[in-house]
Amino acid sequence: MDEKREQSLETWRRQIGEYFASWASQVVLVYLFGSWAAGRAWAQSDLDLGVLFDPALPPRTRWKLTLRFEVDLVGLLEGVGEVDVRELNAAPLAFRYQVIRHQQCLYARSEAERVAFEARLITDYCDFKPVRDHYYRYMAERLRRGDVGYGLTSRRRLVAPRSPASAAGPSPGATRD
């Protein structure tokens, strides 16, 4: 990332922190993630923010605020092309972990809330990771065997083929045992 973009990012960090401080009753944490957090941003990169809302807010309110934040921040941050705000409350565990992985918290309502959120998230992620890894190994093996897909193709491998006589159904007058 060049020096000018690095200066822009530092200015944006400050502005984002100040902006979300005015939403303290509704917003708990805001993280920078994606290419900007990883230091891989280029001219067309959007600014990705993960927002953890107060758990008392209903989902519809969180959704409306997410849209408002995107519009407000595009107007506030000079030189940013696009801002993508993602709600963390209902996001999948693996996504939430990826957001905090680079430790780019731009706003925290309190340090205690940030530490509690990150500690719980890391614990949950580490607890679930063996299950996820097992699933990925299982799916990779199925892909190698060609045993994936929907419908009859995959069922045929699992069910013994029927004889032509049984495929036609029972003969007239046949009784069940």
Image (spheres, helix red, strand yellow):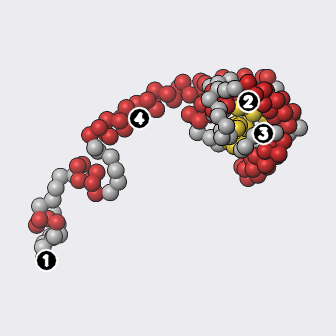
Structural distance between the alpha carbons of marks 4 and 1 = 47 Å
Residue pointed to by mark 1: 172
Q: Looking at the image, which residue is at 67% across and 37% down?
A: 43
Structural distance between the alpha carbons of marks 2 and 4 = 40 Å
- Amino acid residing under circle 3: Gly
- Contact between marks 3 and 4 (CB within 8 A): the answer is no
Badge 4 crowding class, 10 Å Cα cut-off, few under 14, some 14 to 19, many 20 or more, is: few
- Can you tell which of label 4 and label 1 is closer to the viewer? 4
Which of the numbered marks, if any, corresponds to residue 135?
4
- Can you tell which of label 1 and label 3 is closer to the viewer? 3
- Amino acid residing under circle 4: Tyr
Quick check: can you spot residue 17?
A: no
Which of the numbered marks, if any, corresponds to residue 5?
2
Point out the tag, 2 or 3, that comes first from the N-terminus.
2
- Amino acid residing under circle 2: Arg
Badge 3 crowding class, 10 Å Cα cut-off, few under 14, some 14 to 19, many 20 or more, is: few
Q: Looking at the image, which residue is at 16% across and 55% down?
A: 161
User: Which quarter shows the C terminus?
Assistant: bottom left
Q: Looking at the image, which residue is at 85% across and 37% down?
A: 19
Q: Looking at the image, which residue is at 43% across and 29% down?
A: 133
Quick check: can you spot residue 102?
A: yes
- Amino acid residing under circle 1: Pro
- Can you tell which of label 1 and label 2 is closer to the viewer? 2
- Contact between marks 1 and 2 (CB within 8 A): the answer is no
Which of the numbered marks, if any, corresponds to residue 79?
3
- x, y percent for residue 173: 13, 76
Q: Secondary structure at mark 1?
A: loop
User: Which quarter shows the N terminus?
Assistant: top right
Point out the tag, 1 or 2, that comes first from the N-terminus.
2
